Image: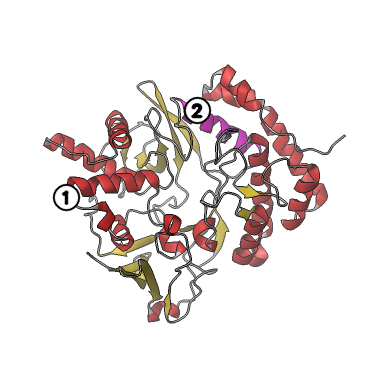
Amino acid sequence: MISLAEVQLWGKTIGAVEWDNGQGIAAFEYAPEFLRSGIQPAPLTMPLRAGAYRFPGLARETFMGLPGFLADALPDKFGNLLIDQWLVAHDRDPGAFNPVERLLYMGQRGMGALTFAPALAKPQSRSESLELSELVALANNALSRKQGLHTQTLEEASALQQIIAVGTSAGGARAKAVIAWHPETGEVRSGQCDAPAGFQQYLLKFDGVSGNGDKELADPLGFTRIEYACYLMATAAGIEMMPSRLLDESGRAHFMTQRFDRTASGGRLHMQTLCGMAHYDFNVAGGYSYEQCFRVIRQLLGARSHEALEQQFRRMILNLMMRNQDDHTKNIAFLMDRRGEWRLSPAYDVTYAYNPNGAWTNRHQMSVNGKRDGFTHEDIMAAATAADVRPRRAREILSEVGEAVARWPEFAATAGVPESLAQAMSSTFRQLGPVR
């Protein structure tokens, strides 16, 4: 068992994290030389100072005994499932693989700019072409068996390594892969290392994977078309998002979105979710509010916060109107550049998420003016005040977002969403304008 890891940011050591197996908690301490840098990788919960940070009060299910900014670097449901199956296949007990070892397994493969040494898994040295149909089959196998992916042939072992390499680092509960895609040739390669010129870095959400989903119902074939239609609607509503598209393969439509934690030249940006940044546990439904998010934006951006506050207010309006009720604290993120300046990340996971009979998405995860449902125009205007958005501008944003939502049939048709399904969804959309 390994209990100590070096934490690096852009290749430079910023500190170390040590696992205490007896207490089941980690301690992190900044390196003395990094303290002089003035760069704040976790400004709200771990400002630069000498001495160890420990957070025994954080929920184990969410943070796994780690500080939030390190827990953010771990994979979520699907990635952890792949790691567990790899461990079983190598006669290792997943339960004995502590969170620091999981960070070391991620090594240089995680989202954002944090890396961990010494890496337990050998990094890919070159970008290799991927066969999507094989990855879909392996993702299906992983989710259906939820045990060891035992391989018998070299070919099967190679395919297993492919799904582990591209599937462990992407966040979220659903099956995803980090890929490099060439827009002219359509070639797909692993996104875990530098790809040849002309390739772009994307996250790919698999379509056609049985048992794929979040906390409630499994996703049906073609659910990715819904997310693409929502992406079209969101961008029309003025939501900042990375370029996204559908990738057709054997009757499946995989959803691709360009990575925002990578620069055009392939560099890394430090990334923290609202959950990791402020220790707002995403598993506590209704535990946090959009107003708290606005406050975090002010803390991080200071005098530069006006545009980000207005953008987050706009995203809130769209989530309420279109019933994206999976709007938890891991679905909001922030990016830091090498100068230490923070900004709101592009929006992501913007999709219809409403199950009136579900325990998770029957209401919104984050509240607005103390409510998770039954919103009034007065609630929206109160939230606008909390976001420093003037009443007139708030009404303009409501109108702009409402106009985009009214075009839902157009976006759904473009994405190939069946008309009956599109109509059923739109029948649940909210109207948030003033009572006339």
Whole-angstrom CA distance, mark 2 to mark 1, is 39 Å
Q: Quadrant of residue 156?
A: top left
Instruction: Tell me what residue is drawn at x 46 percent, y 39 percent.
Output: 214
**Residue 289 position (above or below residue 81):** below
In percent of width and height, residue 418 lies at 54, 19
- Find the residue positioned furthest to the left: 153
Q: Earlier in the sequence, mark 2 or mark 1?
A: 1
Q: Which residues are magenta?
A: 222-237
Instruction: Tell me what residue is drawn at x 45 percent, y 30 percent.
Output: 219
Q: Which mark is residue 225?
A: 2
Q: Which residue is mark 1?
A: 91
**Residue 70 position (above or below residue 346):** below
Instruction: Tell me what residue is drawn at x 73 percent, y 57 percent.
Output: 386
Tell whether 207 sits left or right of 225.
left
In percent of width and height, residue 276 lies at 49, 59
Q: Which quarter shows the C terminus? A: top right
